[in-house]
Amino acid sequence: MRKAGARGLLAMLRERWDRPLFFSLACASLVALGLILFFIFREAAPVLREIGLGGFFGRVWNPAGEPVSYGALPMIVGSALVTLAALLVAVPLGFAAAAFIAEVAPRWMKDVAKSVLELLAGVPSVIYGFFGLMIVAPALQNAFNLATGRTALTASVILAIMALPTIASLAEDALTAVPNAYREASMALGATRWQTIRNVTFPAAFSGLIGASILGMGRAVGETMAVLMVAGNAPQIVASLLKPVRTLTGAIALEMGETALGSTHYHALFALGVVLLVITLATNGAAEWFRGRLARKHGR
Amino acid sequence: MIREITAETEKRQRAAQRVAFALLAMSTLSAFLALGAILYTMFANGAEAISWQFLTEFPRKLMTEGGIYPALVGSFYLTAGALFLALPFAIASAIWLSEYSRGGLWVRVIRVGVNSLAGVPSIVFGLLGLAFFVKVLGFGVSVVSGALTLALLILPILIRAGEEALQAVPMSFREGALALGATQWHAVRTVVLPSAIPGILTGAILGISRAIGETAPIMFTAAAFYMSRLPETLSDKVMALPYHIFVMATESPNYWKTRDLQFGAALALLGMVLLMNLGAVVWRARVRRRKQW
């Protein structure tokens, strides 16, 4: 250790300034995350005093009505409904696409398919929303003879398309992480390639596949513009996919522009942001854990 | 259970495999179909609207005629600002993670921070922008607030791309430089960083294409419904292309009259984003192929 006199410290800084500098700049992400947590929670906190926890988890959201009511349940249910319906389609399709890309497709097809997934993941969400509004919503309106095509189902269809590339490429990573020795052992025992995929590769990659699905779920819950444009945005608790719903993200995007800074409504919208943030951070953490487990298991 | 494998079970297994592989291929094809349907819809309906005038004119008559010029310029300002603000931090973070860190607690903490930040929904970035940049720092609804918000959003994307680019530089490059007596900073500056530049630029392109398409973070922090002039200072509101598409599609009073304009604007955004992504993918592949280290 160098002697830490004032002069020694200066000399050390002159010589070894790079490490502390890069380290402090590397903390930018932590600072950003800290700012997000601090400000979202701070702006949401008055809800506890003004509405109370019971009121916030109430069944009626009616910020402009008489009596005024800020119950978040319709949005929580709305977000859960469209997300789960989307995953019901996107997870099987995503796994199947991943299996094809990782295990079946020849090299060139693999590269093309991965590029297509990457491009699909890069399409801005407002474009998905626009596509849903112009094409999917009218089609579903005709097909089911509805008053409006902007329903939970429309949002689910769009979300499924959006979640597919995320789930497929992460699932492909998980399958690729399974060591080749597993496949070789299975084939040597006389299994076909399909039997190997089904009975060996998929089970071995299981935790990674779960991680991929959870991460897809987090993305779907947090998706804003596409859902806002096609979900119909009625703040009601529904039991049918053919009704309009308002999601957590949709409520914030729709109402924040019209509310006075610092009003109860403003704080309630930040409280919806807290719910959203907690859900997405939890799903993110869980997904990382599952994906990490796969890597640890196979010693990479 | 032991079962004799007869010619017939083998035939059955082969048939099952063919069916299964066909289903897997069709699932993969669904991704192609989705991309194809979106591209086809936008081109078929929007290609006609796009012209030089459309790209260089202001909207007229309550946005029922004219072009998207101010939205294009606004998106350019916001995106360039975000990149300018985020890139130095991202490169420094990547350098620390890849070159200076020696494992341990801080690496894990910072990685968790980066991953968590990448998972935060874009609307929550908008909320932070509103509470912090617009309100507390007093920047108001402005180019500055929007660019800062978008900068935080693309930070994790840029860090990951930068780290990947640095990791791709072979260890022998660093060892060679250090063996010649270079300090670590000297080795990073003259050997490692220059070799990683193409990868870092690819990441920057991906960051730009992400930032230019984001709507939710700028809704409350920067975007204006309509402006009759371009922003003159950093504290002006701006029109932005994705927000313009959103308001035209949801609040336009005359759907049939503006339909072509809407598809034109959507095609302009989609075209820019896909070209950038495609460029990044192709360039990355070329860089990887050319380098034989």
Image: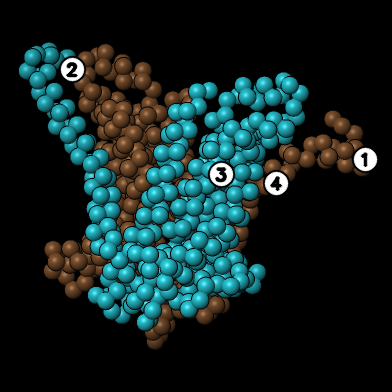
Chain colours: A brown, B cyan
Does the CB distance between marks 1 and 3 fall below 8 Å?
A: no
Give a yes or no on whether discs 4 and 2 share a subunit: no
Residue at the spot of label 4: A24
Q: Position of residue B116 (x, y in %)?
A: 52, 49
Identify which amino acid the numbered label 4 is placed on. Answer: Ser
Chain holding disc 4: A
Residue type of the residue flagged with mark 2? Met
Taking the view exactly as shown, the residue that stands out farthest to the bottom is: A66
Q: Whole-percent x and y of residue B148?
A: 58, 61
Q: Secondary structure at mark 4?
A: helix
The residue wearing badge 3 is: B159
Residue A234 in sight here: no
Q: Residue at x 38, y 50 (%)?
A: B274
Name which quarter of the figure residue B140 lies in.
bottom right
Q: Give left or right: position of B25 versus B228.
A: left
Q: Residue at x 27, y 38 (%)?
A: A97
In terms of secondary structure, where does tag 1 sit? helix
Looking at marks 4 and 1 on the same chain, the residue that comes earlier in the sequence is marked by: 1
Tag 3 subunit:
B
Q: Relative to B5, is B246 above or below?
A: below
Bin the neighbour count of mark 2 within 10 Å (Cα to Cα): few under 14, some 14-19, many 20 and up: few
Q: Which residue is mark 1?
A: A7
